[in-house]
Image (cartoon, grey):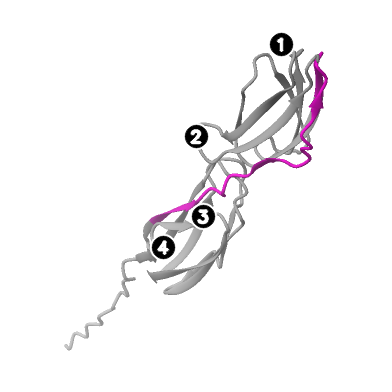
Amino acid sequence: MILLLTATACEIAPAPVLSVNPDPLEVSADGGKVTLSVNAVGEWTTKSDFGEPYGPYFYYVSPYKGSGDAEISVSFEPNPYGEFGRKGTITFECVSGEKTCTVTLPVSQKEADPVFEFTDWNEPLIPAYGGSFTATLSYNCGVTIDIDAIGVTRSDKLIGEDRFLGPAELTFTVPANPTSSERVIQMTLRPSGKDTPTKTYKLTQAGYL
């Protein structure tokens, strides 16, 4: 009797391999397109987490899935905020056979240059007995206003839909001139929490003489 043996070869899938370059991914406030190199063994997909602050979808990944080595584009919207950088992550998951590996890529975008200015300032002339005036402030960051006169108050009214971007109408109320002479009141604007840069605006209040 002749015994015939048949050998069955089982194909074993290779272990998944995955790397992404550059890591981490950092871009300027201007945005634009960045190319990522994906080195992979197996099929991969991406999942984006846009983090905080202020809204999702500040970048877009294309293609968001593939197989093996590839180049993908990450397109960034400009960051309008002068006070906040934006952060997120792109998680790559690679599958080969029954095994999975992941790489989490940190994503960050720098804050924009600070913008803060009165767009309609005309150096107001305030009567000696006091008065009010309104000016429009354009800004993309928190703004501190230092006034070198005692008793000047202000109220703010947001014009835009985003309180972090403005613009806003600022109404200033100046009390009566405590002196008999004309005086110049100076307002210095600066980003909140910082000493520089600054912008200076002046107004004049009449005296009683």
Tell whether position 111 is magenta: yes
| Near-viewer residue (4 or 146) | 146
- According to the picture, the residue beneath numbered tag 3 turns out to be 47
If you read the primary sequence from the N terminus, does the residue marked by circle 2 or circle 3 appear first? 3
- According to the picture, the residue beneath numbered tag 2 turns out to be 195
Is residue 71 visible in the rendered image? The answer is yes
* Amino acid type assigned to the residue bearing label 1 in the image: Pro
Relative to 46, say whether 134 is above or below: above
* Amino acid type assigned to the residue bearing label 2 in the image: Asp
- According to the picture, the residue beneath numbered tag 1 turns out to be 178
As measured in the structure, the alpha-carbon distance from the residue carrying label 2 to the one carrying label 3 is: 40 Å
Tell whether position 183 is magenta: no
Q: Which residues are magenta?
A: 103-132
> Closer to us: mark 2 or mark 3?
2
Question: Where does residue 18 sit, x and y in percent of width and height?
Answer: 36, 65
As measured in the structure, the alpha-carbon distance from the residue carrying label 2 to the one carrying label 1 is: 29 Å
Q: Are marks 4 and 3 in contact (CB under 8 Å)?
A: no
| Near-viewer residue (180 or 70) | 180
- 128 vs 198, left or right, is right
Label 4 residue SS? strand
| Near-viewer residue (25 or 164) | 164
Specify the label residue 94 is tagged with: 4
If you read the primary sequence from the N terminus, does the residue marked by circle 4 or circle 3 appear first? 3
Relative to 38, say whether 170 is above or below: above
As measured in the structure, the alpha-carbon distance from the residue carrying label 4 to the one carrying label 3 is: 12 Å
